[in-house]
Image (tube, rainbow, N blue to C red):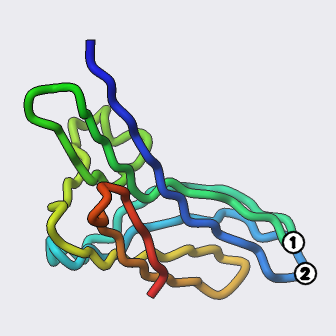
Amino acid sequence: MSMASTEHFFLGVTNVGASKVTNCCFYRTYISSLNDRQKTLLENAFSLDPNEVRYVSIAMFNETKDLPHATHMIGLSVPPNAVCYGAMVPRLMLERRHIISFLAESPDTADAAASCEIWVDENGKLRISIV
């Protein structure tokens, strides 16, 4: 048997306006260490009432400690249907810090962009910081 733990990180998209926002889409737009500027859809066609928050998975850290060689992986989230097309989760190196950018779009409001830095600290924990 194997014991594994997985941590997930989410970013919240908040409607700060006074009216409902519809047809929101959430994209990953940049990964620094892979020099990837492909606009990748992570969440499609959701609505937000005023002050409502929608949390979207952006990354996960998988750690297995009881195998002879511990397995560690930082994986970036992919669209829910990506597995159907055989797409693999983008994997990031543990020894680096990675800047990742995101975009939330809706025809009802201005776009919102955010960037964060993710890394694994000296204690083996996945960390995130908004930049």
104 above or below 44? below
3 above or below 48? above
Residue in view at x 37 percent, y 59 percent: 126
Side of 100 where 18 appears, left or right = right
Q: How would you rate the neighbour count of disc 1 (Cα within 10 Å): few for under 14, some for 14-19, many for 20 or more?
A: some
Residues at circles 1 and 2 in contact by the CB criterion of under 8 Å? yes
Question: In this view, which residue lies farthest toward the top?
Answer: 1
Side of 25 where 100 appears, left or right = left
Residue in view at x 39 percent, y 68 percent: 28
Q: Which three-letter amino acid code belongs to the residue tagged 1?
A: Pro
From the viewer's side, name the closer residue of 18 and 51. Answer: 51
Residue in view at x 65 percent, y 69 percent: 13
Residue in view at x 18 percent, y 61 percent: 94
From the viewer's side, name the closer residue of 108 and 87. Answer: 87
Q: Which residue position holds label 1?
A: 50
20 above or below 88? below
Q: Which residue position holds label 2?
A: 18
Report the disc number at residue 75.
none
Question: In this view, which residue lies farthest toward the front?
Answer: 123
Tally the marks. 2
Side of 53 where 25 appears, left or right = left
Q: Which three-letter amino acid code belongs to the residue tagged 2?
A: Ala
**Judging from the image, what secondary structure is the residue with disc 1 in?**
loop
Side of 31 where 40 appears, left or right = right
Mark sitting earlier along the chain (1/2): 2
Image location (x, y in percent) of residue 31:
26, 73
Q: How would you rate the neighbour count of disc 2 (Cα within 10 Å): few for under 14, some for 14-19, many for 20 or more?
A: few
Image location (x, y in percent) of residue 109:
70, 83
Image location (x, y in percent) of residue 35:
15, 78
Image location (x, y in percent) of residue 60:
38, 50
